[in-house]
Image (cartoon, grey):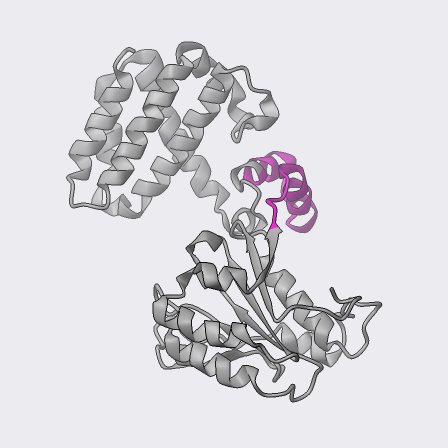
Amino acid sequence: MLEAGRVPGGLLFAGEDGVGKKLFALELAKSLNCRARVGVEACGKCASCQRIMRFALPAADDREAHKKIIWSEHPDVGMARPYGRAILVDQMRDLEREANFRPFEGAARVFLIEDADKLNDASSNALLKTLEEPPVTSHLILITARPASLLPTIRSRCQALRFAPLSAQEIEAHLAREKNLSQRDARVLARLAQGSIGRALSANLESYLARREAMLEVLNAAALTGDRSRLLRAAEEMNDARRKDEYEPRLDVLEILIRDIWALALGAPPEQLVNDDVRAQLSQLGARVESRRAAGWLTLLETLRGQLSVNINRKVATDALFLAMARPQ
């Protein structure tokens, strides 16, 4: 597109959270405005490139600031972000006004719309006005992990680029090289990230390992020892008021472990396991858990997750989950 000089007025960058969509959008903005391009790519070193990467983001609770475009230090590159659960219509109206101005300094005006799936009906309709006839010097880049949530009329006016998840090997190599992690730690984080470099970089490995140890005890009690008193103690620990923020993350870890056990029960190769570093323990569990039973556990977990949206007694629900998991199939 850059080589042909035909970058569309509307672009839709879709893909998993944390795979680099926003960073890529900023690279495109730099390429359009760089003062010393190398071919069609930005040099990354000139004043223009440097300023495009610097934003003064407002506080999350500053509603007034979220009614306007958030500008980078470059006067032609701005961003719209959600306020709470929605992108405000005022911000889209401000974008419509700003998009009609010619570039102040560079060759193009570029507007990033972060988490574009949070456009509500009012802000979507305001954005449509700009997308219908975008000025030739303005480019809107919608960034989302949930493109299906956008209005069909918005999707139809944007050229979509899909960003695939990264391979576990790519993420592992990056973590080992840039974060100086051990091979074991880098491998666990890379597989846990499920293709998202952002998720890998933000994950707390120590917390994950602690949650994994607790959930492995639950699985051992459910599948190997049948120790119902241990299961009830584990349910009580999960529902301790001091650990209320740990409840759903522990359910997440439990689900990942069950999927690994299911994969082993079906004869999957080790590279498909998230927790390959504890394969011996998982293999022991997999030898006792048929694939049908593992599938049943996942169904029980999904049922519990669905109940979390209503005011249920979590302790009673967790007791029921763990005891049901211990029931022979």
Question: In front here: 227 or 261?
Answer: 261
Looking at the image, which residue is at 36% across and 66% down?
120
Q: Picture quarter containing residue 181?
A: top right
Residue 275 x/y as whole percent = 52, 29
Number of numbered tags placed on the structure image: 0
| Above or below, 324 relative to 40 | above
Q: Quadrant of the N terminus?
A: bottom right
Residue 46 x/y as whole percent = 76, 77
Looking at the image, which residue is at 80% across and 66% down?
3
Q: Is residue 172 left or right of residue 267?
A: right
Question: In front here: 303 or 54?
Answer: 303
| Above or below, 253 relative to 229 | below
Examine the residues drawn in magenta and state their main secondary structure. Answer: helix
Looking at the image, which residue is at 62% across and 82% down?
76
Residue 299 x/y as whole percent = 32, 27
Q: Picture quarter containing residue 314?
A: top left
Q: Is residue 290 left or right of residue 9?
A: left
**Magenta highlight range:** 163-190
Question: In front here: 234 or 127?
Answer: 127
Asked if residue 169 is among those painted magenta in the image, a careful observer would answer yes
